[in-house]
Image (cartoon, rainbow, N blue to C red):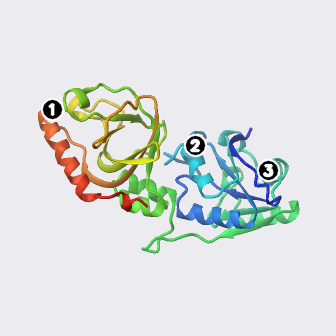
Amino acid sequence: MMQELHEAPNPRCNHIVAALGVFDGVHLGHRRVLAQAVSHGACHVVTFAADSMPKKQGRPVHYIYHDEQKRRLLTTCGADAVFALPFGEIQEMDGESYCRQILKETVSVDTVVVGADFRFGKHAACGAAELRRFGHKLGFETIVVPQVKDADGMPVSSSHIRFLLESGQITKANMLLGSDYQILAHVNTGLHLAGEKLGFPTANQSFEPWQCVPRRGVYASFAEINDIWVPAITNIGVRPTVTGGEAEPIAETHLIGWSGELVGSLLPVTLCRFIRQERRFDSLDALSVQIQRDIQARMHLLPAEGILS
């Protein structure tokens, strides 16, 4: 039932601490929960497979990061093990059954750490108070971490970060995420129009079904190749000049001053600044002129790699 995303048990500590949550985006609030868990023992993250949650508490969800991205971030934050539950298999499980079968019998927890807004059990009927009560009965300690708030005093949440991404507010989204938003996908074979006719070859990447797609437009970005950060511009959209707008949105990244073959490789692309919205041009020549302007704007915005958070 439980999919193991990563496991590397901490040999220095037999005290198992479970950090519970969806952890979509692994934002600043999630990172506080993880830090608390890591400080108390071997941190085992118990989360949900991203594509198994089309809805959360009855509302449709477009997740920020797919499972591989989430796994990488969670392990970077100190998780010794990451387990993903298929949401469909446990959504009818009551709170006490979840605590007994998942937390005690499967993970063997000694301590559980959650955020203040954590919900679990059928219809999300249980919260921190019930978790403490079940923990007292089943033999585990419960630690509840207060919400993290942004500079405006608003709670940091995945839903707000999704709104920021979809509205092109990438700088603020990056601040709340705790690390710059990243596209991580294999490079697809494109139409070769960007390279052959425009003179600006691109690495094309698709988003996963149900994944949150940032606002359509051009972004100042970096691509990571062999641990080297290459300056780039990334267009997210449907390529209206070429397709007429009848296409699924993709990410097209032009690596500035770099040449090589990337098709088939897993390419991390980090978005740092929003430059302009996507629009249709009257000709490929007009589009080519605009791309050159975008490159100039990007290099003005990000003259050095040091701005990366």
Image position of 15 (left or right of 241): right
**Residue 33 pos. (x, y %):** 64, 64
Determine whether label 1 and label 3 are within 8 Å by CB: no
Q: Secondary structure at mark 2?
A: helix
* Separation of residues labelled 3 and 2 (CA atoms): 20 Å
Residue that carries the numbered disc 2 in the rendered image: 67
Q: Secondary structure at mark 3?
A: loop
Q: Secondary structure at mark 1?
A: helix
Q: Residues within 10 Å of mark 1 (few under 14, many from 20)?
A: some
* Separation of residues labelled 2 and 1 (CA atoms): 37 Å
Residue that carries the numbered disc 1 in the rendered image: 284
For residue 107, the mark is 3
**Residue 119 pos. (x, y %):** 66, 58
Q: Nearer the viewer, residue 200 or 209?
A: 200
Q: Nearer the viewer, residue 160 or 206?
A: 206
Determine whether label 3 and label 2 are within 8 Å by CB: no
Under mark 3, the amino acid is Val
**Residue 236 pos. (x, y %):** 33, 42
Please determine whether, in this image, residue 190 is positioned above or below residue 71: above
Q: Nearer the viewer, residue 275 or 125?
A: 275
Residue at image position (72%, 43%) is 90
Counting labels gives 3
Image position of 183 (left or right of 118): left
* Mark before the other along the chain sequence, 2 or 1: 2
